[in-house]
């Protein structure tokens, strides 16, 4: 297969990396041998950090972390790292403000994603808005975080912004839900010229016919722009007699019209197997929220929450991930349509 390229990719020579282990590999992702990279009680007043997102920033790394406080309420904390493996965190929760500078602190905030579009970083998370809904804030310096209007009505989760405007508009993936443990869910896409008014809603992907994603799916890491289309790592959920199992899936969306799925991998890309994925506050969860990419080598580092208790790191290359998705792709007419019924 011809080499796949990142589009608008950056050099990231300090991306964390380990070569794939020897032996049988059934999946195109391999775990960092030092996982979990964030363990229990990582911070005063915080019992667990998981489902968190990182970016490269000024030669080092910075991230927004879901911290489960010792009162059980999740909030978002800022962390930084020299190597994207060892993290230190601000003890203070991120202090969000409204446009007018007034404090805005949601009752709870969880599952943050972090995406740079042009010169601004956007944090997107789930918060209470008369039920579970999407919250959003912007920052340019990781000191001031200014709230952006809530994009959608409740109930919704797993919102992920594309890293550039498409046809002049911001584009957001989301997963309409209920306010509880949502036993259903497809990925949709919405556009906005200004991050205030959202429309042109499209269906992107439905829960899969494969067992590992047969209950619901949700956006994961920000889509990665490549010569094959937008590479999306998402989560797929199976409902078993002992509860939900969250795996990592992979798909490639059309570059100009990402409501069209070009390829969708029928196999999971990673599923809970290690102790830190199978055992924890919620067992059997691998929940991807971010990637780092190095355009020079094609390396991809994937950050995922493990068992609602830890942060795990996994690796792949652009070629291996895309080749695996393409060679195991099954798309239905619901995937390949524009998604506007
Ligand atoms: C989902 C979200 C995630 C969590 C997952 C498994 O509904 O709440 O934050 O990781 O459940 O508990």
Image: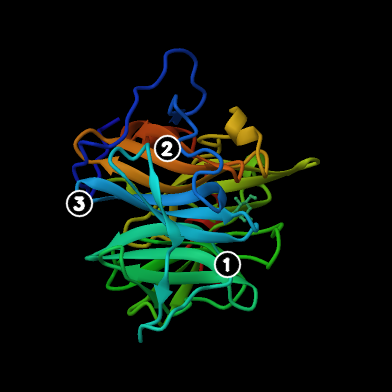
184 lies above or below 156: above
196 lies above or below 159: below
User: Between residues 111 and 73, which one lies in front from this camera angle?
Assistant: 73
Residue picked out by circle 2: 326
Spatial CA distance of label 3 from label 2 is: 35 Å
Q: Which sits earlier in the primary sequence, circle 3 or circle 1?
A: 3
Could you say whether the residue bearing mark 3 is in a helix, strand or loop?
A: loop
User: Residue at left 39%, top 22%?
Assistant: 20
Location of the N terminus by quadrant is top left
Farthest residue, direction front: 44
Report if the CB atoms under discs 2 and 1 are less than 8 Å apart.
Answer: no
- Left or right: where 102 falls relative to 310: left
User: Residue at left 22%, top 41%?
Assistant: 12
Residue picked out by circle 1: 108
User: Between residues 105 and 215, which one lies in front from this camera angle?
Assistant: 105
Farthest residue, direction right: 241
User: Residue at left 53%, top 34%?
Assistant: 270
Spatial CA distance of label 3 from label 1 is: 30 Å
Residue 143 locus on image (x, y percent): 30, 66
Report if the CB atoms under discs 3 and 1 are less than 8 Å apart.
Answer: no
Q: Nearer the viewer, mark 3 or mark 2?
A: 3
Could you say whether the residue bearing mark 2 is in a helix, strand or loop?
A: helix
Q: Using the rendered image of the protein, determine whether residue 338 is visible from the camera's viewpoint.
A: no
Residue picked out by circle 3: 58
Residue 317 locus on image (x, y percent): 33, 33
Residue 268 locus on image (x, y percent): 55, 37
Q: Which sits earlier in the primary sequence, circle 3 or circle 2?
A: 3
Q: Which sits earlier in the primary sequence, circle 2 or circle 1?
A: 1
Could you say whether the residue bearing mark 1 is in a helix, strand or loop?
A: loop
Spatial CA distance of label 2 from label 1 is: 39 Å
């Amino acid at each position: 297969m011809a080499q796949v390229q990142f589009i608008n990719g950056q050099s990231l020579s300090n991306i964390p990396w380990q070569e794939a282990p020897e032996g049988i590999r059934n999946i195109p992702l391999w775990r960092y041998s030092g996982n979990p990279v964030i363990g229990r009680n990582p911070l005063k007043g915080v019992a667990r950090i998981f489902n968190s997102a990182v970016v490269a920033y000024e030669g080092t790394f910075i991230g927004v972390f879901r911290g489960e406080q010792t009162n059980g309420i999740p909030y978002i904390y800022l962390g930084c790292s020299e190597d994207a493996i060892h993290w230190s965190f601000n003890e203070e929760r991120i202090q969000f403000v409204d446009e007018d500078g007034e404090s805005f602190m949601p009752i709870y905030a969880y599952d943050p994603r972090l995406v740079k579009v042009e010169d601004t970083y956007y944090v997107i998370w789930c918060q209470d808005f008369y039920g579970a809904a999407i919250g959003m804030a912007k920052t340019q310096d990781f000191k001031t975080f200014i709230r952006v209007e809530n994009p959608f009505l409740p109930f919704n989760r797993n919102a992920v912004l594309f890293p550039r405007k498409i046809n002049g508009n911001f584009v957001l993936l989301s997963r309409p839900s209920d306010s509880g443990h949502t036993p259903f869910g497809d990925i949709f896409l919405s556009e906005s010229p200004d991050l205030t008014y959202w429309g042109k809603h499209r269906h992107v992907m439905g829960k899969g016919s494969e067992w590992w994603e047969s209950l619901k799916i949700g956006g994961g890491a920000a889509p990665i722009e490549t010569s094959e289309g937008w590479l999306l790592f998402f989560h797929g959920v199976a409902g078993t007699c002992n509860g939900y199992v969250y795996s990592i899936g992979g798909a490639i969306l059309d570059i100009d019209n990402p409501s069209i799925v070009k390829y969708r991998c029928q196999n999971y890309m990673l599923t809970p197997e290690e102790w830190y994925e199978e055992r924890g506050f919620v067992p059997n969860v691998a929940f991807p929220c971010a990637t780092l990419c190095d355009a020079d080598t094609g390396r991809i580092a994937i950050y995922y929450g493990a068992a609602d208790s830890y942060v795990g790191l996994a690796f792949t290359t652009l070629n291996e991930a895309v080749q695996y998705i393409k060679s195991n792709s099954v798309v239905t007419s619901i995937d390949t349509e524009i998604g506007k019924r």
